[in-house]
Amino acid sequence: TDPRPSSLLSSFNSVETSDITKSCQQHEKKAKTFRDPSSGIRLLILNVPITDAIEDMVDELGMWLVDNTIIGASTATHVIAGDNSTSLRARTPKFMIAISRTSNILHMDWLTNSYAEKRVLDCQKYRLINDTVAEKTYNFSMLNSLEEGEKRRNKGGLLNGWNIYICEGVAGNKAPKQEELLLIIKAAGGNILKYPDINSLGKEDQAKSIVLTSTPATSEQKKDPKVSRLARFGKGYFTTSWLFDCIINQQLKGN
C-alpha cells in the first residue's frame, strides 16, 4: 500500500482544461460590446484595485476580465501586474502561473491608453520591465524573464518533459497550498509524478525527474527509500525556493 497520504498529491488530471474554462466563465465578466478585432483578450489584473472605471474600460475594449484567482491566472492572455503606485509581487502563485503562460505582463498604462485611443494598443512598449524595486527584491530581470518565457513556451514550457515529485509536507509549508503548487508546475509544462508511479518509471523518465522538497529539506523527506532512489537516478532533490526562482526567471538553474 502507498504509505503517502493520498490527499497530498491528488491527481492534477482532476483539474481538466474544460473544468478550468468552466470555472473561469462562472466568475469572469464578458465584454458588453466587441469594438476591437482583438477582443479575444483574457485580462488578469494583479496588484491594482479593480474599480468600476477599470471594468468599464475592459468592457468597452471588448476584453474578458478573468477572475483574480489561480484559475483565472492559468487562462489569462494578458496580465496587468502594476501601475505607478504599486510594485510587483513576483512570488505569488498567481504571478508565477501567469508568467509561465504569457509574456504580456503589462503596466496599467496599457489599458488606460488603449481606452483613450479606443483600440487595443500593442503590448511591447507597455511591458512591466522597469520595476527596479521588484527586480532587486526578487533578484531577476523582467525583460530577460519575458524573453526566456517566450522561448520556453515555444517548446512546451519551462518544465516540459520533466517529472516533478512533491515530497510530503511541502505544500503549505513556506510554500503555496497544494492546488496552487500543482497549477504552478502544470502552467510551466511539468508533469506531476505521484508516489505509486515512481517504480514504474523507465530509465529515461527517471533521468528527467526532480524531487521537490521544502525549503530547507527535512530529514523525513529524504529518508524514504523509494524517493531517495528517484533522486539518485534522477536530477536530485530541489527546494521550493529553487523552483520559484526558476519560474520567475523562466530558466532552469542547477539542473
Image: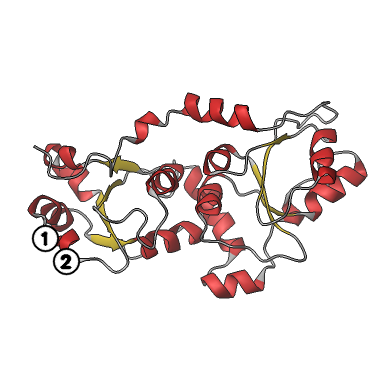
Residue 223 is tagged as 1
Relative to 59, is 45 on the left or the right?
A: left
Element at badge 1? Answer: helix
Position in image of residue 38 (x %, y %)? 76, 32
Give the answer, above or below, for where 113 lies relative to 241: above
What whole-number distance in Å separates the C-alpha atoms at marks 2 and 1?
A: 6 Å
Position in image of residue 184 (x %, y %)? 44, 48
The disc labelled 1 sits on which kind of residue?
Answer: Lys
| Residue underneath mark 2 | 219
Tell whether label 1 touches label 2 (CB within 8 Å).
yes
Residue in the foreground of this view, choosing between 225 and 51: 51
Relative to 117, is 159 on the left or the right?
A: left
Q: Residue at x 61, y 40 (%)?
A: 76
Position in image of residue 146 (x %, y %)? 58, 55
Residue 98 is tagged as none
Residue in the foreground of this view, choosing between 42 and 92: 92
